[in-house]
Image: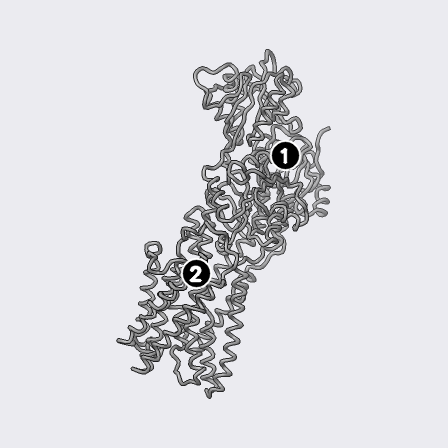
Amino acid sequence: MAVLGLSEAAAQERLKVYGPNEIPRGRKVSPWVLLLRQFVHLLALLLWAAAGLAYLAGTPELAVAILAVIGVNGLFSFWQEYRAERTAEELLKLVPQRVMVLRDGRFRLLDARELVPGDVVKLTLGNRVPADIRLLESEDLAVDASAFTGESLPETPGPGDLVLAGTLVVRGEGLGEVVATGRRTRLAEIARLSQTPPREATPLEKELRRLVQTIAWVALGAGAAFFVLFLVAGLDLYKAFVFTLGVTVALVPEGLVPTLTLSLAVAAQRMAARKALVRSLEAVENLGLTTVICTDKTGTLTENRLEARLLLTPQGVVRPEAVQGPLPFHLKVLADILATEELSGLDPLEEALRRLGATLGGKPLGPVVHRYPFDPRRRRSGFVAGNVLVVQGAPEAIAPLVPQGETLLAQAEAWAEEGYRVVALAYRELSGSPPATAEEAERELRFLALLALEDPIRPEAAEAVRLAQEAGIRVLMVTGDHPATALAVARKVGLVRENPTLLLGSELPQDLALLGALVDRDEVVIARSTPEDKLRITQALQARGHVVAMTGDGVNDAPALRTAHVGVAMGLRGTDVAREAADIILLDDHFATILEAIRQGRATYTNLRRLLAYHLTDNVAELFPFLAWAFTGGRIPLALNVLHVLALDLGTDALPSLALGTEPPEAAVMRTPPPKSGLVTREVLLRALGVLGPLEALWTMATFLLVLFLGNHAAASGSAFAAVVFGQAANALASRSDVHPLWRLSLKTNPFMAWALLASLALLFLAYTSPLAQAFHHAYPGPWLGLSVLAFPLVALGDALLKAAWRKQKGA
């Protein structure tokens, strides 16, 4: 019966019921709301407060500088979040704009938005499938569904099979009936998964939020306490308020957030130079904390390039590279068949067969005069070229058709267990016209060859897996491929050894707690996974406290990429949707590049701890003069004022802090487990608040009092300011390593540090020039500068003794 399709009137009625064929965009957040968020969160509010304090302290220039920092950070964060919010919208690009639809008995070119269930659509080479369609007719049809299935090879659906919206027709043509449009398609389901749940705050964001909240409450509480203390000490209201500002400003590390952001940006640049493009700065920090990598197989651990490795002919097993001299009859027939027009490299399998034919020196049999399209139920196809009829397909589909079927099947099963993709070929010579049907064509066949094809393992993959395991990172393979293939590849790269756990996506429990317990172990391979499986695996591991990096390249991977702490998309073969959902894009698709990115991430996380200790040390030295003034009832004058504090935080400390944030990875960074204790550790607090901070503070006050006794207040204040600068210079140099003292660290590995310290000293001496000296209410200390310089060796010695004690403790 002829297919007429819907009438126009019926289609319009259904359009009212089902709505337009488009992916729902979900609730869209206004860009203005996104922008406003970047300027009202707690980190930004602290900087706003610092700017206000700077203005009240009579330094509008510094207030403007802080506002500029707020603006740069806010705009950058806005752009990152805005790009992430567009992830689901990228799915719309997979739906075509115009399609060929059968209406009122004739084909018409319509906008894809007008499709409704029941419409009959024609699919041809190059078409993007516009909706979920049940095939009515199929003529050698093949579709690239890798974005959904994870399979590297095209699918060949037949009549009765479903093809999904967003897949691509790579061969042949078909006719099908639309069964789902818009929000009811599989593509829309994945779009909804990409939108919800929202990505949770990163570990760094959570920790910085806690840290800033703590600092804010401490600063406000201390400010209020000191305000009362200043009033009790007899200060008038204005002076008490000004001194309270000094205490509050001293406790707020204004330079911490900008330098953290810049350090992450520098790390992102380094990763880009190593083929890992960073789309989200938080991902740099998360890479350093990663405890689990969920990786796919094809193209990441393997090269996504099939190669024929073994041949089974009636004469036995041979390797293609071992064939020399005149070809035996069966190999000659095989070579000529593989060189025909039919095998023209439309997909990786056919490309591999074509290369094999060329390697064997085959000559085309002639033009293809008849084809028997692939039947998904029989799992075989055929063609006639010259006087030869060829049938190819899965070994279990060819075995019943040839006399040597049992031998063929046994060898195929053995090769499949080794991870090979196996294809069988049979043939017969024709004396007349080609058979009309495939059933007639598949009679009296002779076995020609069994081919074992391999997707080669990337040369660096096994070493990268070993490095990940040495670094305490668990690697799970999560793939849509066949379980035998997945397990074989996992063995070759060292992911599994003696006791692998092979799981199928359909076997995974729905309960996240059970799922987490099942996959949170070594030597796990998960095959035939679905988009929901990847998402739930990510959530289950996160619920168990893991920092998860998930790799992916298809539409199906977008939800898991977005939910993972670090979404890693493939740059060469990944879809736009996957790249938009990811935090990191691998420009070379290599698993080894992930490890290099993690190495940089760990170095960055270590540097963030060093930055925090560096700034807290400075805060102790800045706060101490106010404490000394308060607890002596004003008998000890203020060594530093509010302008000194701001100049240290945003001036002399800025470049050394940034240089510290660019310190390259130490040799042992990938030989230890991922850090678990966060940025604020016992070592950070002991270093900043227990040793180096007090050393800087005590020497600053000692220098101030000595110069005050021998000279005047202006010179003494200038000496105190210089003492903090020199102490922080030693602190910056010593903080470059957690193990070695500063005299054992070469500046060749971080030349920026030398320039940063020179710039810091230049700013120090610039502060002694008029009119800056008048604004600071200090003077050049003259010969007393030598006392300030002694802060450098004092801090260096304190750092060396502290590290020696740590080494002794760890050795014990």
Residue bearing mark 1: 122
- Numbered disc in front, either 1 or 2: 2
Classify residue 143 by image quadrant. top right
Q: Position of residue 763 (x, y in %)?
A: 33, 69
Q: Are marks 1 and 2 in contact (CB under 8 Å)?
A: no
Q: Position of residue 455 (x, y in %)?
A: 51, 33
Q: Secondary structure at mark 1?
A: strand
Q: Position of residue 74 (x, y in %)?
A: 49, 62
Q: Nearer the viewer, residue 806 or 542?
A: 806
Classify residue 479 by image quadrant. top right
- Badge 1 crowding class, 10 Å Cα cut-off, few under 14, some 14 to 19, many 20 or more, is some
Mark 1 or mark 2: whose residue is earlier in sequence: 1
- 578 relative position to 626: left or right: right
* Residue depicted at 47% across the width and 21% down the height: 360
Q: Quadrant of the N terminus?
A: top right
Looking at the image, residue 550 lies above or below residue 49: above
Q: Secondary structure at mark 2?
A: helix
- The three-letter amino acid code for the residue at tag 2 is Trp
Q: Is residue 262 visible?
A: no
Q: Which mark is residue 806?
A: 2
Q: Nearer the viewer, residue 257 or 710?
A: 710
Q: Position of residue 92 (x, y in %)?
A: 59, 47
- 617 relative position to 370: left or right: left
* Residue depicted at 47% across the width and 81% down the height: 241
* Whole-number angstrom distance, CA of label 1 to CA of label 2: 73 Å
- Badge 2 crowding class, 10 Å Cα cut-off, few under 14, some 14 to 19, many 20 or more, is some
Q: Which mark is residue 58?
A: none
Q: Is residue 572 visible?
A: yes
- The three-letter amino acid code for the residue at tag 1 is Lys
